[in-house]
Image (tube, rainbow, N blue to C red):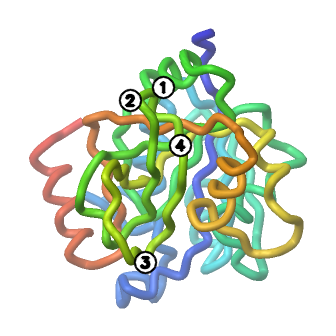
Amino acid sequence: MTDKIKQAVILSAGLGTRLRPMTDTIPKPMIPLLGKPMLEWNIEQFRRHGVEEFFINLHYLPDVIKNYLGDGSKWGVKINYNFESEIMGTAGGVKGFEKIIGDIFYLIYGDMISLVDYSKMAENFWAKQNPIGMQRTKKTDDYADADVAEVDGNLKFIKIHPKPHTEKYSIAHRMRGVFILKKEILSYIPENQPYELGKQLLPVVVDAGKNFYGYECSEYSKGIDTIDKYKEVEEHLKTHPI
């Protein structure tokens, strides 16, 4: 199966405290890169690969995002919002869309820039055996600040090791913020409580014997949680125009 995946969740509820003073007046996903908000970069990239509908959770300064993006018609897409009075975490944020989202969708963190070729990722996903989900990973020894997955030869997750780490792993794949998920996975997220993808949901899913896979690719993506990383991403976009 090589069907296009037409929906994407962009998690956008974070406070962005480490990016102050930039985030004093705007949410972190609205930080401008070469004059364009990070959210707009990500919507445009997904749009290139056939995504038509977006789901964006909100908490901090929600009207800044809604007033800029509106219903999405400017980009030829539909945007759905969910306001969280309490931040529900990376998995809990997706759970908030359970009643309206389709059977399969992309997911990214809203505080990152991602130029992933989502069409290739989807092809890889459909080639796997009965996957419940997939996450971009990178085999590395540099994972002190990241959650880690141990995988088999087919990149199927065998064990999750959330940070902080107290040991070294012989085969460690750094878990990165780009996913494809089947709606089925949302049934493992508890109702009405904060819940995290890497630390809580994926260990439960893997321990339940579900097939969750890693995906390796060379396209650029970078989380922006410090001023230095912001400057690094903007420089990359200047020197590598899309």
Residue under circle 2? 117
Q: Considering only order in the chain, which callout, 4 or 2, is on the residue closer to the N terminus?
A: 2
Q: Considering only order in the chain, which callout, 2 or 1, is on the residue closer to the N terminus?
A: 1
Residue under circle 1? 49
| Residue contact between numbered discs 1 and 2, judged by CB atoms under 8 Å | yes
Type of the residue with mark 1: His
**Is 69 rendered above or below residue 185?**
below
User: In the drawing, does residue 57 fall left or right of residue 38?
Assistant: right
The percent position of residue 110, horizontal first and vertical second, equals 50, 60
Please state which of residues 24 and 131 is positioned toward the viewer in this rendering: 131
Label 3 CA crowd tier, 10 Å (few <14, some 14–19, many 20+): few
Q: Considering only order in the chain, which callout, 3 or 4, is on the residue closer to the N terminus?
A: 4
Label 4 CA crowd tier, 10 Å (few <14, some 14–19, many 20+): many
Please state which of residues 102 and 135 is positioned toward the viewer in this rendering: 135
Q: CA distance from mark 4 to mark 3?
A: 19 Å
Residue under circle 3? 164
Does residue 177 appear in the picture of this structure? Answer: yes
Residue under circle 4? 157
Q: CA distance from mark 4 to mark 1?
A: 26 Å
Does residue 71 appear in the picture of this structure? Answer: no
Image quarter for residue 152? Answer: top left
Q: Residue at x 31, y 71 (%)?
A: 144
